Amino acid sequence: MAVIGGILLSLAACGKSATPPEEIRPVRAMLVQVGATSIQNTYAGEIRPRYESALGFRVGGQIQQRLVNAGDKVMRNQVLVRLDPKDLSLSEAGSRANLAAQKAQLEVERADLERDRKLLAENVVSQSAYDRQSSKFLAAQAAYTAGEAQLRQSGNQVEYALLRADHDGTISSVAAEAGQVVAAGQTVITLADAGTTEVAVNVPEDQIQRIKLDQPAQVSLWSAAGKTYPGRVREISASADPATRTYAVRVTLLQAPDDLRYGMTASVQFEITGLPDMIQLPLPALVEHEGKAGVWIFKPEADAAVGTVDFRPVVSAGLAGNAVMIGSGLKPGEIVVTAGAPLLHAGQKVRLLDPALASKPSP
């Protein structure tokens, strides 16, 4: 029995396989260094004119004819919309007839005053009678002057039945059609000025302090991929939008393309400089481990290119394009895994794809 037991133990020992060695995973890493920090913030925007006028009639009435459409280019003083002028023309005719009657009355009072002047010289009429006639003449003269003003006003109202462009530009929108009755001052046509073109963007309140007046910017259009156009910040809103809590920023296009149209989608990129020097790492280097954000630090062994990794929590200070700025948690000269970090665990053996990295001196 003792012999049989020994044989069984020997067979059991022979059946156990040796534990395979731990896999050494290749990783890409970088040496931590402190460098100059610049951030490029990009915001979506819309192409808008700098000046846009909401045009309406000075008088009310029914629209007789609309002569332009949205998107048309117009010249200064060009007629855009016409009102039915019948009532206004009748008012002008009435004012002209009233002025003719006042002129006739003025001539009668002038003749009576001249006659009373001669009679006063001959002591035929009294001074008081002459003064009364003089007052009647002055009243008729004032009524005639008022009639002239009324006629001019009626003539202006006939002209107001024509809605004209107050400057060269492009019709942005049309808010009324032929046959519609509009009130004085009601918007009928929106006219965009043909001058400066801008991009309207909204900047969050936590980033608005980074934007300054006259700051340069780069504008790209969704319709022209791969092309950028220079711009400059012209206006920054003093108050935030109550709904979105963002600030309106206007960027002037310094070199606008000829085929640019209002309403196109644009992207505005601002480069933020003057920030303190900080450590920057590629975004893939930042991982989450046990509920904390951090990076894997490479610890070399006898072979400098082979070592283990330890997790190090870090504090992010923001993004700079495709890089993350590290506020605290790292020191210059440490080696951080930048590719393959999500597949690692604490104490795992790794091999640097760039063996020379481990031999570089600390900055």
Image (tube, rainbow, N blue to C red):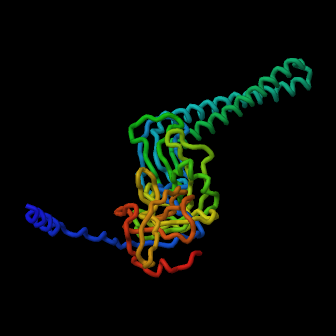
Residue 322 vertical placement versus 207 (above, below): below
| Residue 289 visible in the current orientation | yes
Residue furthest front as drawn = 2
Give coordinates of residue 216: x percent, y percent. Answer: 59, 64
Q: Is residue 253 visible?
A: no
Q: Residue at x 87, y 24 (%)?
A: 119
* 14 lies left or right of 91: left
Residue 127 image point, x, y percent: 90, 20
Decide if residue 305 is on the left or right side of residue 106. left
Q: Quadrant of the N terminus?
A: bottom left
The x and y percentages for residue 20 are 25, 70
> Relative to 269, is 172 above or below?
above
Q: Residue sitting at 40 percent across and 73 percent down?
A: 28
Task: Name the residue rendered at 43%, 68% in the picture.
Answer: 337
**Quarter of image, res 250:** bottom right
**In front: 207, or 290?**
290
Name the one closer to the observer, 183 or 143.
Answer: 183
- The residue closer to the viewer here, 315 or 276, is 315
In the image, residue 265 lies at what x, y percent? 43, 57
